[in-house]
Amino acid sequence: MVNESNREAILDAASELLTRVGRDAVSTRAVCNAAGVQAPTLYRLFGDKQGLLEAVASRGLASYLAEKQNLPSTGDPVDDLRRGWELHIGFGLAEPALYALVYGNPRTGAEPEGAEQAARILAGLVHRIALAGRLSVPEERAARVVHAAGRGTTLTLIATPPADRDMVAARITREAVIHAITSPAAAEDGRPSALPSHTGPDGTAATAGEPAPRTRADIGPSAIALRAALADLTALSPSERQLLGDWLNRIIDDDTAGSPDGPATAAAHDTR
């Protein structure tokens, strides 16, 4: 009980120093003085200053993560991703010191537990887009793109004086990312609504009612959607699911090689 009380007092003191003065002010001596404990108590509970900072970050992220995890679905997984993006940026602007502590000083393989949980929530949002047949790049790559862009946008906004923050630029970035990783929603016939319906396989006019041919633009998302659902294909044995997964990866890679938008888009889709 005493340990828990000391732990909370230390975390409260460290969080207050972080918010009021910044990360550089969060020294073990300053925290101990503010919390009214001796240094050995801090080291016993948190190991070292880095352990303390990670605990501060994880506790500070808890309410944000709870809100993000419980965000009600709109029924459109792409819109759900948009809302998650806005929630992420809103958290960063509301808690700039905490956000900078979590994301502003990256160390390989050393993210706080809360940041790892946030990454899992993002992966879940991306997975739902894949299951809907609207993801045009592999899931892991899509999540990395969204995370990198959201993180960079938020840190840029934090570093900009509030009066000069360009929220329109932030929304443009969001939409550019979404455009890069998703395909249009399907029309009533199941085809992406943006695909032309007036040309046949040879580029000539199709007859009335004749569907447009499938192209790389909708084969890729279909393969990614099936790849995302592999674990649920219980009619197949594990070895059959593995083989199907290998085939789907080849289809996705072939879609990458033939990307109509040039090397930059192909690089974004490349799974190798």
Image: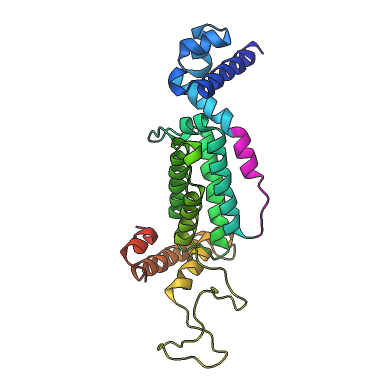
**Is residue 193 found left or right of 137 in the rendered image?**
right
Any part of residue 242 in sight: no
- 99 and 55: which one is in front? 99
Extreme residue in the bottom direction: 207
Residue visible at 55% across and 74% down in the picture: 193
In the image, residue 250 lies at what x, y percent?
A: 39, 66
In the image, residue 72 lies at what x, y percent?
A: 68, 50
Extreme residue in the left direction: 263
Residue visible at 43% across and 43% down in the picture: 152
Asked if residue 74 lies in the magenta stretch, the reply is yes
In the image, residue 13 lies at what x, y percent?
A: 56, 16
Range of magenta residues: 62-75
Quadrant of the snapshot with the N terminus:
top right
- The tally of labels here is 0
Above/below status of 23 relative to 237: above
In the image, residue 257 lies at what x, y percent?
A: 34, 68
- 188 and 156: which one is in front? 156
- 102 and 157: which one is in front? 157
